Image (cartoon, grey):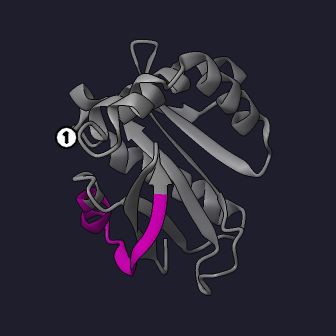
Amino acid sequence: MKIREANALDAEGIARVHVDCWRTTYQDIVPDEFLNNLSYENRTKMWVQNISNENNYVFVAEREGKIVGFTDAGREKTGQYPGYSADITTLYILKEFHGLGIGKQLLQQVFLKLKENTMTSALVWVLEDNPSRHFYEAMGAKVIRNQKDITIGGKQLNLMGYGWRNI
């Protein structure tokens, strides 16, 4: 497994992982219509922009030349959570690669990049019904907010905020 910083050529591979992970992770959580309408093409455009933004730090996990996971982070922008300087906006790994330590490697790599850029604490928002949220607990994150409402595909869902005071 190779963990590396993403480049513009990775946008399509990241988009595929992103869409596929949403469809498997959020099945029975997010409405099927929303998941079925996710588009590789639209996500690719989004990831071209995210990767080209110098304030985003995007890393991929690559196996045999294929992207199987990724993470994205940057400075916390809302200012609503004093003491947290960074935001982990995404961390997805294809289901067949869960349990291999890839998430931990991606998180460690993005933490290093954040520290290089004077960010020493981080938060992440996770759907409460997402069983993968326990990964963040295993990685030492503490619940900082039990509930924040979000609407996806017309369905009201709850987000949980996790944080690391010292990454």
Residue closer to the observer: 80 or 137: 80
Q: Quadrant of the N terminus?
A: top left
User: Circle 1 sits in a helix, a strand or a loop, which is it?
Assistant: loop
Taking the magenta stretch, the answer to whether it contains residue 145 is yes
Q: Is residue 9 something that shows in the picture? A: yes
Q: Look at mark 1 in the image and give the residue it sits on.
A: 99
Could you tell me how many numbered marks the image carries?
1
Q: Where is residue 2 in the image (x, y as percent from the top left)?
A: 44, 28
Residue closer to the observer: 54 or 28: 28
Question: Few, some or many C-alpha atoms within 10 Å of disc 1 (few <14, some 14-19, many ≥20)?
Answer: few
Residue closer to the observer: 80 or 141: 80
Q: Where is residue 165 in the image (x, y as percent from the top left)?
A: 48, 81
- Can you say whether 10 is above or below 152 in the image? above
**Looking at the image, which residue is at 46% across and 48% down?**
152
Residue that sits furthest to the front in the current view: 154
Q: Where is residue 119 in the image (x, y as percent from the top left)?
A: 65, 70
**Looking at the image, which residue is at 47% across and 31% down?**
18
Taking the magenta stretch, the answer to whether it contains residue 71 is no
Q: Quadrant of residue 156?
A: bottom left
Q: Where is residue 154 in the image (x, y as percent from the top left)?
A: 46, 47
Q: Which amino acid does label 1 sit on?
A: Gly
Q: Is residue 162 something that shows in the picture? A: no
**Looking at the image, which residue is at 40% across and 39% down?**
92
Which residues make up the magenta segment? 134-150
**Looking at the image, which residue is at 55% across and 33% down?**
4
- Can you say whether 60 is above or below 79 in the image? above
Horizontal side of 54 relative to 38 (left or right) equals right
Horizontal side of 100 relative to 103 (left or right) equals left
